[in-house]
Image: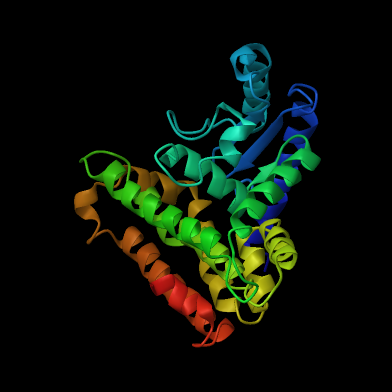
Amino acid sequence: MTSTYTKTTKSSNDALSELRASLSEIVPKDAVAITCGSYARREATVGSDLDFYVLVPAGTAAGESTWFEAAKRSIAKVVTKPPAADGAFDSCIPIGELLNNFGGEHDTNKTITRRMLYLLEGEYLTNEPEFRRIRRDIIQRYVSETREDRHLAQYLLNDIIRYWRTITVDYAFKTQDAGKPWAIRNIKLVFSRKLIYASGLFSVAMTPDRGQDEKIAIIEELFSMTPLDRMSEICGTDQVEGLRDCYDKFLAWMDDEKTRQHLEALPKTDRDSDDVFREIKDEGYRFGDELLKVFHSTFPGDHPIHRSVIF
């Protein structure tokens, strides 16, 4: 039987190919159009939007209106659902913004979101060479802070952990008011958001006892894969079979229009009694158990990742 992930990979790749062909004639050659989210992870389902933004050279964002609006119209022909309003996407951003302010008062929720998703699930829509160069520059900046070869790329690990904790807190903030959409956000947090985090953590765990250039090369190669394929590469296909099974069920639910409509309309007061939500959440707990199992089987107790994650 064909898995849902296999189906979504094909449909996502088809959409990416169409977007790349159309945007190459619209986006300036010195800019880079990027997508994150379900299309970049090759798991777009019914109701998926296209999270995207464009990196532009300094001083050019003010003149974006004509070509950027044309780019958005072109995207809407392929993916009809727009990104969330006032979020980190659907905008032009100076390239330097992604390469500076790693931490500190100017590193807002939007900037860390763009930077982390660029690394952990980003995919190019235009200008692939520049997309890869920028990703390598970001990785190199993180890894350059690693003092000794024997150490993990701790700076990168800490920012991945910070991002994960940020989105879990933001979920509570965004859904604390009655009537706001919450159920699908909750389910995504349990599955896709957690997988993104875990795949980043597992990637950094591959970096101790390696020189700086090798650390960069390893992370760059792993970050070029989708999060699910990254886990298979690190842990082995057999080891992640249970993980992939859980995730495929999640994708099947997200690809079922009736299920999505049910979750979108579900009152938060019914979270403990609704059979559909409880079934998906129970699978989410199993997914978390599978992640923990492969973490321990891949990295023995004396591996430095254990101490680094806790302390």
Residue drawn 59% across the image and 64% down it: 146
Rendering coords of residue 230 (x, y %):
65, 65
Q: Quadrant of the C terminus?
A: bottom left
Name the spot of residue 274 as percent of width and height, x first.
27, 58
Q: Residue at x 68, y 16 (%)?
A: 67
Which color mode does the image show?
rainbow
277 horizontally vs 160: left or right:
left
Residue 8 seen from this side: no
Lateral position of residue 89 relative to residue 30, left or right: left
Quarter of the image with the N terminus in it = bottom right
Quadrant in which residue 51 is drawn: top right
Between 183 and 32, the one lying in front of the other is: 32
Q: Residue at x 58, y 39 (%)?
A: 98
Residue 267, x across and y down, in percent: 24, 46
Name which residue lies at 44% across and 78% down: 307
- Could you say which quadrant of the image residue 245 lies in? bottom right
Does residue 48 sit above or below 308 in this rendering? above
102 horizontally vs 264: left or right? right
Q: Position of residue 203 (x, y in %)?
A: 61, 67
Q: Is 281 in front, or is 117?
A: 117
